Image (spheres, rainbow, N blue to C red):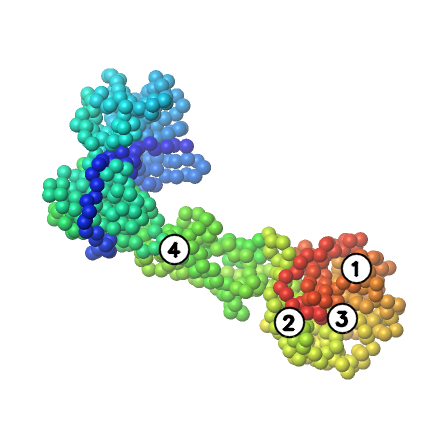
């Protein structure tokens, strides 16, 4: 992985601290948003008048171009030199690291055995140096073919600066023997600024590369450990700490003004002539005037140059290259110079092909979402030009109008990549109900948290598909458990997230006045539609059919027939004769078991009864379970009066094999019923409830010797004392 060891502006400022302090009584001026941007027309950056490329972050400049670094993640960094003359971007080969002295056209690359110096005006190698004679010195970079290194004494921390010219190699004379924290500035010709500390006191000097001599040493004029600082012949400016104001001082008169910067994170302070340029180069999550690059004089005149800033580097001619952008022109590289009117102006010389304003892209997800295939959910991704935004996602089921709304703000959980906003949809709607099959419309609104530009909106559609479930009234692929509590009827939409333990339910009231019936039983689809139905027996013995509807409830009742008061147990939902239609069984008070084959006709849903067993009065509860034993035919479970639960495997001809014991202790439950496949394994399940209304779910395994798993908690509350499956 390559590392760039060029000293940062902050490192130079820290090394240049001094004993000067901000005097009391300095007026603080609020950092108000200034007038319109002082942006010149787009500059003709190369000989053809075209904008230059900007492949990454600018990390250095020279007279012929600038150096960029692109983060490739696990593959390290890619460095390129972009020439001003024609826009050519030349990759800098390296195995270990790339070093650069700002202002130089030479770039140094290192591998295990060799240091290579390239002249980036042509891209040719001008010098190679074996690493062994360097004796572990740190390579700082090169100017022309002159290599600069730094050695550090492991015991004292004292440092020496070495100058390796092609004709001679020596350490820089004039650097104190006890110097520490040596750093380099921007080279201009043979003059290279050097900063260092002696006994904690910062100094500045200039290295003459032709003679390897350090001269003109002076103590730094800035407060020690200044957060950011710079000066010209007429003005100096500094921020003493991250929460201190920016102080701008006229060097001739000593007059000062201050700007409250708040609490900065990545402050930039540069001085051009009489103007101090300043900004905070962090990503803002609230409107802030210091996100813009502004210029200010000691007398208080102010110019706003850019709307946002990423980084800034000095050019050898004294101008400034700033990577940032404006709402009008987008992100790019801007050259800041003092114009003919004496005011600084920004000229765009390179484009990053990215806007400053928020831009949303189209949904990156399939047009058809299979939520059974993706049981843990699905990622809905939208390209977003920048991530300091609040994003509201609304999904609307077109048939029902029900929605799922999520508000996302920048975080590792919400955003999957630097240019992507992600809603990890778990397949549920607001309130926890599972999403329905069918068409959905979506809308996304991204609002910039920093207040730069308008909100961005996008909309579109997709379709959700789930496999059908025999107990599903709402077309969302999950079984609906129908319960009666008092005279009211409720639908409990069972929910399950594979990554979480247990199951839950979303409870919806779907009817009242059901106290007129002494027996209510769900039957699955017996009326020929795609939805499950229900039968209810009134106290006069008349059996009624309630057909399921697409609204999640039942249509008006239809009369099936009278005389049903002779039965004390009724169970429905298993296909006992393999004709593809659910059937109904009932036990009379004498203990006979009767089969009513389903017809699929709503007007006459059952064929005449057939006696298929006797002695069933030993059971106090029976339930049709669907196929839980592994054979194609439907099965039945029955509880005897001692609490033992028995399995009757259907043989496919309307009769049952000899009973098999499932287990004891089932008299702890007041009721139990079958539901169709709550966990998606293709086998129906069983729900049981005790006298306190606590419910347990037994998942079907498909093995007749042990048809159910151990019970799991079924959350959702108030299951009542009358389960209907």
The answer to whether residue 574 is left or right of residue 66 is: right
Q: Compared to 144, does 525 lie above or below?
A: below
Mark sitting on residue 490: 2
Mark sitting on residue 578: none
Q: Quadrant of residue 56?
A: top left
The picture places residue 226, in percent across and down from the top left corner, at 26, 39
Query: Which comes before the other along the chain, label 4 or label 3?
Result: 4
Mark sitting on residue 598: 3
Query: Which comes before the other along the chain, label 1 or label 4?
Result: 4
Callout 1 crowding tier (Cα within 10 Å): few <14, some 14–19, many ≥20: few
Judge depth for marks 1 and 3 and give the one in front.
1
Measured Cα–Cα span from mark 4 to mark 2: 42 Å
Instruction: Name the element at disc 1.
Output: loop
Q: Compared to 213, does 92 lie above or below?
A: below
Callout 3 crowding tier (Cα within 10 Å): few <14, some 14–19, many ≥20: many
Q: Quadrant of the N terminus?
A: top left
Judge depth for marks 4 and 3 and give the one in front.
4
Q: Does the residue at mark 2 contact the one at mark 1 (Cβ under 8 Å)?
A: no
The picture places residue 559, in percent across and down from the top left corner, at 72, 81
Question: At 71% from the left edge and 64% from the top edge, which residue is drawn?
Answer: 689
Query: Which comes before the other along the chain, label 2 or label 1?
Result: 2
Question: At 51% from the left edge and 69% from the top edge, which residue is drawn?
Answer: 401
Measured Cα–Cα span from mark 1 to mark 3: 33 Å
Instruction: Name the element at disc 3.
Output: loop
Q: Residue furthest front?
A: 24
| Residue wearing tag 4 | 389
From this viewpoint, is residue 468 visible?
A: no
């Amino acid at each position: 992985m390559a590392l760039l060891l060029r000293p940062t502006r902050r490192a130079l400022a820290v090394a240049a601290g001094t004993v000067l302090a901000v005097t009391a009584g300095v007026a603080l001026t609020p950092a108000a948003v200034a007038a319109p941007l002082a942006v010149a027309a787009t500059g003709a950056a190369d000989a053809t008048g075209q904008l230059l490329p900007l492949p990454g972050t600018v990390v250095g400049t020279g007279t012929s171009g600038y150096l960029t670094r692109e983060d490739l993640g696990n593959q390290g960094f890619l460095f390129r030199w972009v020439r001003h003359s024609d826009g050519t971007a030349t990759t800098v080969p390296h195995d270990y690291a790339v070093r650069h002295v700002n202002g130089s056209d030479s770039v140094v690359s290192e591998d295990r055995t060799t240091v290579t110096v390239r002249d980036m005006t042509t891209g040719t190698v001008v010098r190679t140096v074996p690493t062994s004679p360097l004796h572990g010195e740190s390579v700082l970079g090169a100017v022309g073919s002159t290599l600069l290194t730094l050695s550090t004494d492991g015991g004292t921390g004292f440092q020496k600066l070495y100058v390796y010219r092609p004709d001679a190699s020596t350490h820089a004379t004039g650097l104190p023997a006890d110097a520490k924290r040596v750093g380099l500035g921007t080279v201009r010709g043979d003059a290279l600024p050097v900063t260092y500390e002696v006994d904690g006191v910062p100094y500045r000097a200039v290295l003459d590369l032709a003679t390897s001599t350090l001269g003109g040493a002076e103590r730094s004029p800035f407060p020690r450990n200044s957060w950011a600082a710079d000066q010209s012949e007429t003005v100096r400016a500094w921020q003493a700490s991250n929460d201190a104001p920016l102080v701008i001082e006229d060097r001739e008169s000593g007059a000062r003004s201050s700007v409250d910067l708040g609490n900065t994170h990545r402050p930039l302070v540069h001085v051009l002539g009489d103007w101090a340029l300043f900004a905070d180069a962090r990503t803002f999550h609230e409107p802030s005037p210091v996100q813009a690059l502004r210029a200010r004089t000691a007398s208080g005149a102010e110019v706003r140059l850019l709307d946002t800033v990423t980084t800034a580097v000095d050019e050898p001619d004294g101008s400034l290259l700033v990577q940032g952008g404006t709402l009008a022109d987008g992100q790019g590289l801007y050259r800041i110079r003092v114009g003919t009117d004496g005011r600084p102006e920004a000229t765009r010389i390179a484009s990053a092909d990215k806007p400053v304003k928020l831009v949303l892209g189209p949904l990156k997800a399939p047009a058809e979402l299979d939520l059974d295939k993706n049981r843990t959910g699905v990622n809905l991704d939208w390209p977003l030009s920048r991530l300091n935004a609040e994003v509201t996602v609304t999904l609307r089921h077109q048939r029902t109008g029900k929605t799922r709304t999520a508000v996302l703000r920048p975080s590792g959980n919400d955003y999957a990549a630097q240019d992507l906003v992600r809603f990890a949809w778990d397949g549920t709607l607001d309130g926890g109900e599972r999403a329905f099959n069918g068409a959905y419309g979506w809308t996304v609104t991204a609002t910039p948290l920093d207040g730069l530009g308008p909100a961005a909106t996008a909309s579109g559609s997709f379709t959700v598909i789930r496999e059908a479930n025999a107990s599903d009234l709402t077309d969302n692929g999950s079984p609906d458990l129908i319960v009666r509590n008092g005279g009211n009827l409720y639908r409990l939409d069972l929910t399950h997230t594979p990554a979480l333990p247990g199951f839950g339910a979303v409870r919806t009231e779907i009817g009242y006045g059901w106290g007129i019936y002494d027996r209510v039983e769900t039957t699955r689809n017996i009326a020929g539609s795609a939805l499950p139905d229900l039968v209810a027996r009134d106290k006069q013995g008349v059996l009624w059919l309630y057909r399921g509807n697409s609204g999640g409830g039942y249509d008006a009742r239809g009369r099936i027939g009278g005389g049903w008061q002779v039965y004390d147990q009724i169970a429905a939902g298993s296909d006992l004769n393999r004709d593809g239609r659910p059937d109904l069984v009932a036990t009379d008070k004498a203990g006979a078991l009767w089969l009513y084959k389903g017809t699929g006709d709503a007007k006459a849903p059952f064929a005449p009864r057939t006696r298929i067993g006797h002695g069933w009065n030993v059971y106090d509860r029976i339930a049709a379970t669907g196929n839980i034993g592994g054979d194609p035919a439907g099965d039945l479970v029955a509880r005897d009066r001692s609490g033992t639960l028995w399995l009757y495997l259907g043989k496919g001809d309307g009769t049952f094999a000899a009973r098999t014991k499932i287990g004891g202790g089932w008299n702890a439950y007041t009721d139990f019923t079958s539901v169709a496949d709550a966990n998606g394994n293709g086998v129906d399940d069983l729900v049981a409830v005790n006298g306190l209304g606590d419910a347990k779910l037994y998942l079907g395994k498909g093995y007749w010797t042990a048809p159910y798993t151990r019970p799991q908690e079924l959350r959702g509350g108030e299951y009542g004392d009358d389960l209907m499956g």
